Amino acid sequence: MSIRDMDTVFMDNGGFDEGFVQGAIKELLDALDFLHTEVKSVHTDVHPGNLLLGANDNSMFQKLEDDEFARPIARKQYEDRTIYLSRLMKPKVGPLLLSDFGETRIGPGPHTGDIMPIMYRAPETLLHIPWSYPVDIWSIGLTAWNLLQGRTLFTARKQDGSLSDGAHFAELIAALGPPPQALLDRHRSRALEYWDKDGVWGEFVPIPKEKTLEAAEAKLKGNAKFMRFIRRALTWDPEARPTAKELLQDPWLEE
């Protein structure tokens, strides 16, 4: 079961407690540190749906088997197949497993092309700038937020509900402030679709000024260490983001 499924089924999309999230992010950073430094690969698809809860032993599966023998799950039989209802099993906390390497890129790059779920996309991918390991660090920040708050930080949607890079950029500006001009200069033609030559936002997509990080954070009531962790991971400039190993030493994770 993924952590996202666990939140949906058992936590009512309310998110997890801080201690659980800190432990999960530590394990995830350990996995990414190995992937980046030893395997020399970029995962590109880190989010709660790809974080699986492992099992320390088979005891929970034995109970599942016993329950099935005692009370067989409902099923519908057809001539060519049988369809079974799912049997819910609340998992115990076990080792966290990073899964789904289908979009992994081998080598540090720089790589190009669309990656990441839309609301998880890092600024460099939105700006069509070549990318590398830091895209996974961006995903770490959004995953930590998602697990704790029970929702994604960014929606990438306009008021009519349609997906939009412009709306996504506007949310980033509201939460993180404007991007550095040097970043925009790395792909001028793409940047000029949304900013003028001086780096001023075009305003054709209004900046949702109420969507600051502080306004969006509801669970920890402005916990300074958590907010600093998020801002370190969600840095506009990919070269300014910490590595997975460096982020493991963050004060929020050492509490």
Image (cartoon, rainbow, N blue to C red):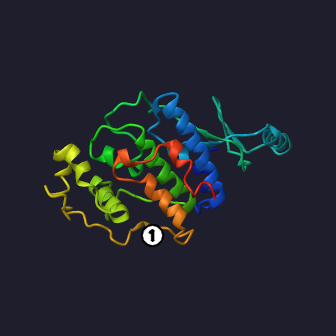
Q: Position of residue 231 (x, y in %)?
A: 44, 58
Asked where in the image residue 186 lies, by quadrant, the reply is top left
Query: With 188 as the anchor, is 73 left or right in this view?
Result: right
Vertical arrangement, residue 175 with respect to residue 78, above or below: below
Q: Position of residue 73 (x, y in %)?
A: 75, 44
Query: With 49 as the anchor, is 159 left or right in this view?
Result: left
Vertical arrangement, residue 209 with respect to residue 13, above or below: below
Query: With 23 as the anchor, is 65 left or right in this view?
Result: right
Q: Position of residue 27 (x, y in %)?
A: 61, 44
* Residue position marked by numbered label 1 in the rendering: 214
The residue lying toward the viewer, choosing from 2 and 243, is 243
User: Is residue 201 in view?
Assistant: yes
**Image quadrant in which the N terminus is located:** top right
Asked where in the image residue 148 lies, by quadrant, the reply is bottom right
Task: Report the residue at 16% width, 52% height from top.
Answer: 192
Query: With 171 as the anchor, is 66 left or right in this view?
Result: right
Type of amino acid under label 1 = Glu
Task: Report the residue at 51% width, 43% height from top.
Answer: 244
The residue lying toward the viewer, choosing from 44 and 164, is 44
Q: Total marks drawn? A: 1
Please rate how many residues cluster around mark 1, counting C-alpha atoms within 10 Å: few if below 14, some from 14 to 19, many from 20.
Answer: some
Task: Report the residue at 42% width, 45% height from top.
Answer: 117
Taking the view exactly as shown, the residue that stands out farthest to the left is 197
**Image quadrant in which the C terminus is located:** bottom right
Task: Report the residue at 27% width, 55% height from top.
Answer: 180
- Secondary structure beneath dot 1 equals helix
The residue lying toward the viewer, choosing from 182 and 1, is 182
The residue lying toward the viewer, choosing from 19 and 239, is 239
